[in-house]
Image: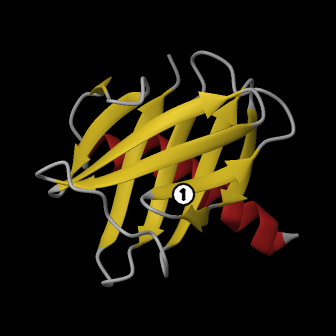
């Protein structure tokens, strides 16, 4: 019970404080999703009715191979927080199935490390 409370508190801090300082304001990406720049990497979030997909590119828009990435998406919506393990899909996607559509205004944080060990964290608000 205590570990669960600590985990929730850590997630709240991640969503509320840490992420805004790590990424620039979201722009529209080539796949129609919100695009942010995080430490020389571009991450684009596309929310579909049954999945979240993140597209990874470098600073020159070249696809980044996701194999070996250890990334998680944390979704906060309507007072509920869920954590989704992201699965690599070539050539440059990380994806996770959702049990319901993620609605407009939901906060999504992607966090973890890329295959090269580079740690990333980015924050999105679903349009």
Location of residue 89 by image quarter: bottom right
Residue drawn at x 77%, y 74% as measured from the top left: 3
Q: 114 above or below 111? A: below
Badge 1 crowding class, 10 Å Cα cut-off, few under 14, some 14 to 19, many 20 or more, is many
Residue drawn at x 21%, y 55% as measured from the top left: 62
Of 15 and 72, nearer the camera is 72
* Residue lying at the far left of the rendered structure: 60
Q: Residue 19 appears at what percent x and percent y?
A: 36, 47
Check the picture and name the quadrant holding the N terminus: bottom right
Residue drawn at x 62%, y 53% as measured from the top left: 95
Q: 9 above or below 26? A: below
Residue drawn at x 49%, y 55% as measured from the top left: 93
| Residue identified by numbered label 1 | 94
Relative horizontal placement of residue 67, taking residue 3 as reference (left or right): left
Q: Residue 30 appears at what percent x and percent y?
A: 32, 30
SS for dot 1? strand
Of 40 and 32, nearer the camera is 32
Q: Residue 123 appears at what percent x and percent y?
A: 41, 41
Of 45 and 81, nearer the camera is 45
Q: Residue 120 appears at what percent x and percent y?
A: 34, 63
Location of residue 6 by image quarter: bottom right
Q: 89 above or below 126? A: below
Relative horizontal placement of residue 3, taking residue 108 as reference (left or right): right
């Amino acid at each position: 019970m205590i570990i669960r409370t600590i985990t929730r508190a850590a997630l709240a801090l991640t969503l509320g404080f840490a992420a805004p300082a790590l990424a620039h304001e979201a722009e529209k990406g080539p796949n129609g999703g919100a695009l942010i720049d995080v430490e020389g990497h571009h991450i684009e979030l596309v929310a579909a009715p049954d999945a979240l997909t993140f597209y990874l590119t470098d600073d020159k828009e070249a696809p980044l191979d996701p194999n070996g990435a250890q990334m998680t998406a944390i979704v906060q919506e309507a007072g509920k927080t869920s954590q989704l393990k992201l699965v690599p899909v070539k050539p440059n996607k990380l994806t996770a199935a959702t049990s319901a559509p993620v609605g407009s205004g939901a906060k999504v944080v992607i966090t973890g490390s890329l295959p090269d060990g580079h740690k990333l964290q980015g924050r999105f608000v679903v349009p």
